[in-house]
Amino acid sequence: MKKTNLSEHNPDSIPSAKGFRIGVIVAEWNNEITDKMADGAVATLIQYGVAENDIELIHVPGSFELTTGADLMLRNRKDIDAVICIGCVIQGETRHFDFICEAVSQGLTNVSLKHEKPVIFSLLTTNNMQQAVDRSGGKHGNKGIEGALTALKMVALQKELTR
Ligand code: RBF
């Protein structure tokens, strides 16, 4: 079975998310992309049973701040089961892209291990704006939806293993 594009998934493969509490952290940079990813993520969480009141959505200025946003969320909201971090970094002419992507991927891994909670990496790292458009509700699906599905699967796994 092809597993690369969760936007086209079998709903039966997704656990019920009733009672789950999920944080969504959205970078404002490239917000025409990140807002669509956030909308997809929130709609998907609700579709699978997360109550609207159990979703806490916050914004951070740029993708680099997703790490601090996730850390603040998990430190101050002890009942949150997982956080989905949404950002879009587009390759420019300088090496900023590499530093941001490296920092976020490492940073979110560290936050997840520190808080012992799933932290989902919904970060588009594209060569250009078209590639980002294609992955935020375009021909390659919506990576925000995929982030939400990943969060639900990981929370279900955590609950199963800690039961
Ligand atoms: N943040 C993003 O989320 N996506 C970007 O494509 C992006 N490009 C940046 C390019 C430059 C040259 C700079 C200085 C910042 C960029 N940022 C971007 C913002 C970054 O994530 C962060 O908010 C700032 O560096 C402040 O810590």
Image: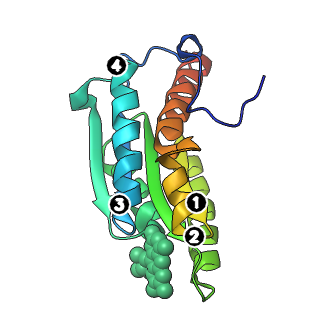
Q: Quadrant of residue 108?
A: bottom right
Query: Which residue does the numbered mark 2 point to in the structure image?
Result: 128
Question: Quick check: can you spot residue 117?
Answer: no
- The location of residue 36, given as percent across then percent down, is 37, 49
| Dot placed on the residue nearer the N-terminal end, 1 or 3 | 3
Query: Considering only order in the chain, which callout, 4 or 2, is on the residue closer to the N terminus?
Result: 4
The quadrant holding residue 23 is top left
Residue topped by disc 4: 19
Residue 147: image location, x then y, percent:
51, 40
Query: Which residue is pictured at 28% across the width and 46% down the height?
Result: 57
Q: Is mark 4 on a helix, strand or loop?
A: loop
Q: Quadrant of the N terminus?
A: top right
Q: Give the SS element for disc 2.
A: loop
Mark 3 highlights which residue?
Answer: 32
User: What type is the residue that disc 2 sits on?
Assistant: Asn
Q: Earlier in the sequence, mark 3 or mark 2?
A: 3
- Kindly identify which residue carries mark 1: 131
Q: Earlier in the sequence, mark 3 or mark 4?
A: 4
> Does the residue tagged 1 have its C-beta within 8 Å of any atom of ligand 1?
no
- Depth-wise, is mark 2 or mark 4 nearer the camera? 2
Residue contact at pointers 2 and 1, CB within 8 angstroms: yes
Mark nearest the camera among 3 and 4 is 3
